[in-house]
Image (cartoon, rainbow, N blue to C red):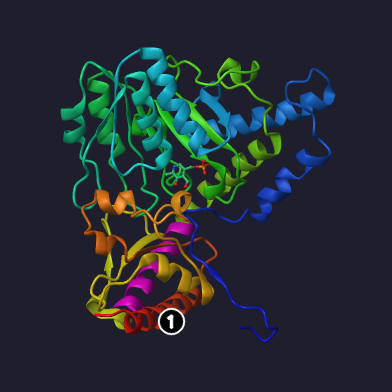
Amino acid sequence: MSKTGVMKTVYFDHAATTPLDERVLKAMKPYFTEHYGNANSAHQRGNKAKVAVEEARETIAELIGAEPAEIIFTSGGTESDNAAIKGAVNATGKTEIITSPLEHHAVLHTAEALKRKGVRPVYVEPDADGIIQPEKVAEAITDDTALVSLMHVNNEIGTINPLKEISEVCEARQVPFHSDTVQSIGKLPVDVNDLGLDFLSISGHKIYGPKGIGVLYMRHATPWLPWMHGGSQERRRRGGTLNVPGIVGLAKAFELCVEEMQQHRAHFKQLRQHLVTALDDTFGGRYQVNGATEAAVPHIVNLAFPNTQGGLDGEMLLLNLDVEGICVSNGSACTSGTVEPSHVLDGIGLKPEVANSSIRISMGKDNTTEDIDFLVEKLEVVVNRMAKATPA
Ligand SMILES: Cc1ncc(COP(=O)(O)O)c(C=O)c1O
C-alpha cells in the first residue's frame, strides 16, 4: 500500500494487451471529434478521413516492405487470421491447411471450424523448445495444401519460428504462407519480402495502439476471396465503415515501436537478466522457464514451479499475485477465465502438473528493474504461502 492508501500494482501482462501510448492517443483524438467523417463519403469531411486512412496505409506498408494496396484494415488479429485462412481456402478450393498445435485460438479454432466444409487441418509438431522446424513443414505439404499458417512469436512462451526458412519451403511448393505476427510486430524486424510472407496479421493493441483495429497484409496476386461481405470498402475485400481513429492510431503506434525497437529490446534483455538472476537467488532449482530461451523474445517469460511440494496451481498463483498487486497471466489471455490447461504448454510436451503450475510474465517498455524486484518479492511470498498450504 502506498502512502496515499492506494495499492501499488505492477502490470506484467503486455502480451495480453498494452496501454495506449500518449502520443498515439494524441494522433487519434482529432479523428473522434473534428475529422469524424466517413472515409467513404464524397464530401470534405469524408475526404479528410480518407486522406488520414491512406497515409496510415502507406506508413504501415512501408514498415513491412509492402505496397499500400496490399494492406487491408480489419478489426484485429482474430479477424486477420480468419480472413487469411478462410480467404485462401475459398479461393483455392483445396482441402488441407497446415498449421501447428501452438497457434493462437484465432488460427486453431478457424482451422477446426473449416472441418465442417471438408477442410482437413494438418498440425506440424514443434520441437521440445516449441519451435517449428522447416523440414517438418516440407513433409506435411501436399498438392491439396491451400495454405500454411504459422505464427512468428508465440504469445505464451515467446519462441520465434524460423519464418524465412519455412517460407522457402512453401515457395518451392507454391503454397501461400500466412503468419500471425501479432506478437512480433514492433518487437522484431518484419519485412514481408525478407521473410517471404504472402499473408500477415497485425493487431493494434499489442503495440501500444488501440483495441479493435488490425491489418491483414495480402501479397498482390495471391489467390484469395473475401470471407465476409458488405460495402465496397478496402477494394471490396473487407466491407464495413473504416475505423479511422483506430487506423490512425495503429499506424502511429507501429511507427513508434519500430523507431524505438532497439532501445526497447536492450531494455527487455536487461530486465530479463535481472529477473532470471533474482529468480535463481530466490527459488534456485524450484522453478523453470518453459520453451526456448535463445530463440525467444526477451519480454515474454513463461515460468513453472514444478518442484514445489505438492505442486502449485497456476490459476491460484495468478489470483494470489493479483491480490498482492501483480498482474500476470496463466496461458493465453483470450482463454483465461477458463480452467483448461494451456494448449501451448501441452503442445511442447510439459506434464499437466508442470503446465498447470505455470504463469506468463510479459514485460512492457515502461517496466523497470524495481518492478521486477517487486514481482520476485511477491512471488516468493505467494509461492511459499501456497506451498505450505498444499498437502504433500
Ligand atoms: C498471437 C495472437 N494472435 C491473435 C491474437 C488476437 O488478436 P486480437 O485481440 O487483435 O483479435 C492474439 C491476442 O492475444 C495473439 O496473441
- Front residue of 105/283: it is 105
Q: Position of residue 15 (x, y in %)?
A: 46, 54
* Residue 369 higher or lower than 289, as above or below: below
Q: Is residue 131 magenta?
A: no
Locate residue 169 relative to residue 298 in the image: left or right: left
- Front residue of 249/126: it is 126
Q: Is residue 277 magenta?
A: yes
Which residue is drawn at the image coordinates 23% and 74% (left, top)? 307
* Residue 65 at least partly seen: no
Using the rendered view, name the quadrant where residue 134 is placed.
Answer: top left
Q: Position of residue 71 (x, y in %)?
A: 53, 27
- Front residue of 149/31: it is 149
Locate residue 172 relative to residue 25 in the image: left or right: left
* Residue 126 higher or lower than 236, as above or below: below
Badge 1 marks a residue whose secondary structure is helix
Q: Position of residue 130 (x, y in %)?
A: 25, 49
Using the rendered view, name the quadrant where residue 331 is placed.
Answer: bottom left
Say if disc 1 is inside 8 Å of ligand 1: no
Q: Amino acid at mark 1?
A: Glu
Start and end of the magenta stretch?
Answer: 263-280
* Residue 1 higher or lower than 121, as above or below: below
Which residue is drawn at the image coordinates 54% and 38% (left, top)? 76
Which image quarter is the N terminus in?
bottom right
Which image quarter is the C terminus in?
bottom left
Q: Position of residue 220 (x, y in %)?
A: 45, 18
Which residue is drawn at the image coordinates 32% and 66% (left, top)? 357
* Residue 105 higher or lower than 279, as above or below: above
Using the rendered view, name the quadrant where residue 42 is placed.
Answer: top right
Residue at image mark 1 = 377
Main SS of the magenta part reads helix
**Mark 1 packing: few (<14 Cα in 10 Å), some, or many (20+)?**
some
